[in-house]
Amino acid sequence: MNSYWLLYFLSLAPLIGLGLFVALIIYLAYNWRLLSDVIGFGMARKRSQNRKKFKTLPIIISLAVWALAIEALLFRCGGIICRASPNSTNITSQITNSTSGPDLAASFPFLASIAEVSSLVQANWFSYAVIGLVFVCSVIVVRSILVSWDETRSELIGKMPLPLPEGIEAVEAAIHILKSQTALDPRMRIINSYQSMVERAKGVGATVTSDQTTRELEAAIRILLRVNSPAIRELTDLFEEARYSLHPITEDDAGRAQRCLLDISRQMDLRLNVIKIET
């Protein structure tokens, strides 16, 4: 077809292909944070839009594509790293012989030199390049997943109602009771601090009666605080133990109650800070 330029292109093909692989790896490695942020935020946005939808067809197609790729590598390519077949070696020899000789050297200057330079590229270099590409892409994908999880968590926190000012004051008052009422034993300090929070919960409309269980009182306190913290359950357990148990309540128990209140306070501050950042 008189496409003599194709000889130069074929001679340079291994070098061009390897150069493109290396350039792609360098580009991905240089922009790995930006790419992972973009992918992660996109995943989080898509998850929020399709939170109640579970599409099985894309998953089945993805699994089928991966199965075909693994089948090609194992049965057609001889493993994860492809092995050169005898046929491909014979074809390469035929092309090399057909493009050599004094007549062709005169007609196509520098073709022999280009072929020699390109012959320096080994086939296994492409395997190493693919491994490097897979490694960089894996790092980007892992960080994208972490970014999407953080974004989804921040979005869920943002949808929660803000802590009430009465809740913040209730936590501060309960901490003050545990610290200041040193004349009382730890049992009474824990009971007083918890009951002070229950009284404030009644002030914001929570239903509180004298015959309620500790779990019902805990539900009223959650209405007051508007945070989902395991420290509330631990604090309720300490209150229940102090109120109904017969074994001694020590200063360590009072210290645990104070740490629970501090954890709740930090989570309320975190919730407020998230809202400030988003607004």
Image: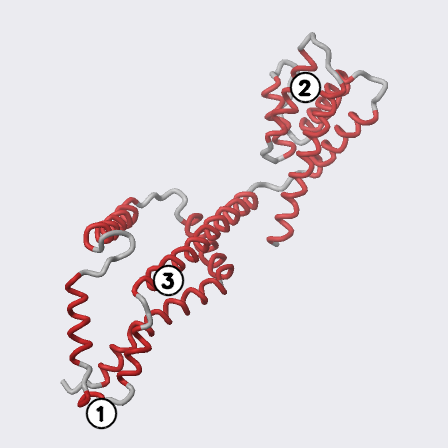
Give above or below for 210 relative to 148: above
First in sequence, mark 2 or 3: give its number.
3
Q: Amino acid at mark 1?
A: Ala
95 sits to left or right of 270: left
Image depth: mark 1 or mark 3 in front? 1
Categorize mark 1 by other alpha carbons within 10 Å: few (<14), some (14-19), many (20+). Answer: few
Q: Position of residue 257 (x, y in %)?
A: 70, 25
First in sequence, mark 1 or 3: give its number.
1
Residue depicted at 68% across the width and 19% down the height: 239
How far is mark 1 from mark 3, CA to CA? Answer: 36 Å
Q: Which residue is mark 1?
A: 106
First in sequence, mark 1 or 2: give its number.
1
Residue 129, labelled with which disc? 3
Image depth: mark 2 or mark 3 in front? 3
How far is mark 1 from mark 2, CA to CA? Answer: 97 Å
Helix, strand or loop at mark 3: helix
In the current view of this chain or complex, which residue is farthest to the right? 183
Give above or below for 234 relative to 56: above
Q: Position of residue 107 (x, y in %)?
A: 21, 91
Image depth: mark 1 or mark 2 in front? 1
Which quadrant is home to the N terminus? bottom left
Residue 85, labelled with which disc? none
246 sits to left or right of 182: left
Q: What is the quadrant of residue 84 in the picture?
A: bottom left
Residue depicted at 67% across the width and 31% down the height: 204
Helix, strand or loop at mark 2: helix
Categorize mark 2 by other alpha carbons within 10 Å: few (<14), some (14-19), many (20+). Answer: many
Give above or below for 95 relative to 4: above
Q: Position of residue 70 (x, y in %)?
A: 25, 50
Q: Which residue is mark 2?
A: 239
Give above or below for 204 relative to 123: above
Q: Amino acid at mark 2?
A: Phe
